[in-house]
Image (spheres, coloured by chain):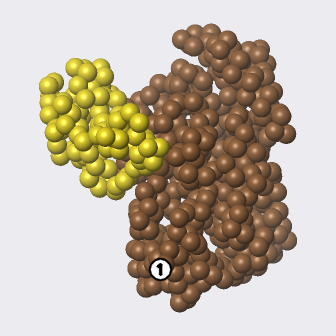
Amino acid sequence: MRYSGLSVLKEGLFGNKGWKPAWREPEPKAEYDVIIIGGGGHGLATAYYLAKNHGITNVAVLEKGYLGSGNVGRNTTIVRANYFLSGNSEFYSHSLKLWEGLELDLNYNVMHSQRGILNLFHSDGQRDAAARRGNAMVNQGDDAELLDREAVRRMVPYLDFEQTRFPIYGGLLHRRGGTARHDAVAWGFARGADMRGVDLIQNCEVTGIDIQDGRVRGVQTTRGPIRAKKVGIVAAGRSGQVAAMAGMRLPIESHVLQAFVTEGLKPVIDHVVTYGMGHFYISQSDKGGLVFGGDLDFYASYAARGNLPMLEHVMEAGMTLMPMIGKAKILRSWGGIVDMTPDGSPIIDRTDVGGLFVDCGWNYGGFKATPASGWCMAHLMATGEPHEVARRFRLDRFLTGHLLDEEGTGSQHNLH
Amino acid sequence: MRITCPLCGARDRREFTYYGASVYADRPAEGAAPEVWDDYLHLRDNPAGEITDLWYHELGCSAWIEVTRNTVTHAISATRLLADRATPTKKGARS
């Protein structure tokens, strides 16, 4: 069913009895043209664009838990296109354009809010770096404004401008950046894919990948074997285990990344604000909770929870930057398992096995990439060729040295 | 989380810097093929379960420590000085 203002009004008048489930719960068929392993944001987006852009609808998305149970429901919901390197910048620019039309396209309210992202800087050197990044963003066709200290003060007067150890020199403002409702993004893509005939199969864990004569033939699952001509691995933090079923070792180390939310408060933080001298970023959800996060815990982990030292660091950074949040009570903290690559950039590519593709390595930043990741993975799986804006996300770039190291921190997985 | 340094005893995790899987200590010899360097620097088994990884006691005695740890539970089952393990074979050396 199509959602509209009229349908909301009508259902409201008649006791909301007419709403239907947003997607079917089909039994897996014996064979599909395409199987996507992983029913998170990227996997669902891939299935959606396979159907919508390429007319490939005999598709199954296999999810071991429930749809959107992984990182798409565990992130801090930030959407932006403020990358510097060629290879990254055109991809995230494409993604932001998709975000801007996503709700109309999906007929689903993902609560995309372009409230602006302000990246603060705290020294002359950081100002230069911000100016350079801003120029790269403008050259890419996106927006960036360099704000001086007084302009930042007018915009976000609640920051501690004077007394911190790292005084605020200014900020790089990306007005088209913002947030979206993370779960709704998964649900919107799921519904859109289902409406076009894609089978979304939950509680179906892939336990093996069948390969014959160098080509993928299908998968073994907890709900029986399923044949397929093409298989895409879109499993985020679990990519390593899934790829191992095909005899592959990936350039990925999985780490835990924590996030935090406070009790609901009245509107107080109108933008996304990031601190330049500690890893801290914050926004306020539509429910009123302050949502913020920091760095990885820095050691390899599959536990979806973190340790106290990083929590302490994040709280300290937050208190240094905006002491006014000190009395807000933390409601919850949680961790997501992120797939860290040695250069901090993702992989959307073929593999050495015919018909087997990977979409992984999203590091800290998979959420904002969701539409473009699905768009480009669908393009790759449908046509066999990389999409123009994702052509640098190659699996072999680590071997050939064509790295996309945005932060320039070197080949260590946890430093990106 | 506390890590038992073989020299200093149980110490806070914050004293240690993490260097990933302990293959990081098996640096290829000079002149090794690009595939060997790729394997050493980038590719990882990335297990969900027991891993041997490398920690540097940076704010302590500066020892390099090999830690056997579970990546799902964070439980640490063993630690030893990297210096105490058998000298690793240099992979990919062109002899």
> Residue B48, position in %: x, y?
34, 56
Residue A256, percent from left and from top: 43, 45
The residue at which mark 1 appears reads as: A212
Judge by depth and name the residue closer to the eye, A300 or A155.
A300
Q: Give me the residue at 52% from left, 36% from top.
A: A416
Chain letter for the yellow part = B
Is residue A110 shown to the viewer in this render? Answer: no
Q: Give the colour in which the image draws chain A.
A: brown
Q: Quadrant of the N terminus of chain A?
A: bottom right
Q: Position of residue B34 (x, y in %)?
A: 47, 43
Q: Secondary structure at mark 1?
A: strand
| Relative height, residue A405 to residue B11 (above, below) | below
Query: Mark 1: which amino acid?
Result: Gln
How many neighbours does mark 1 have within 10 angstroms: few (below 14), some (14-19), or many (20 or more)?
few
A276 with respect to A49 (left or right): left
Residue A343 placed where, x, y %? 54, 40
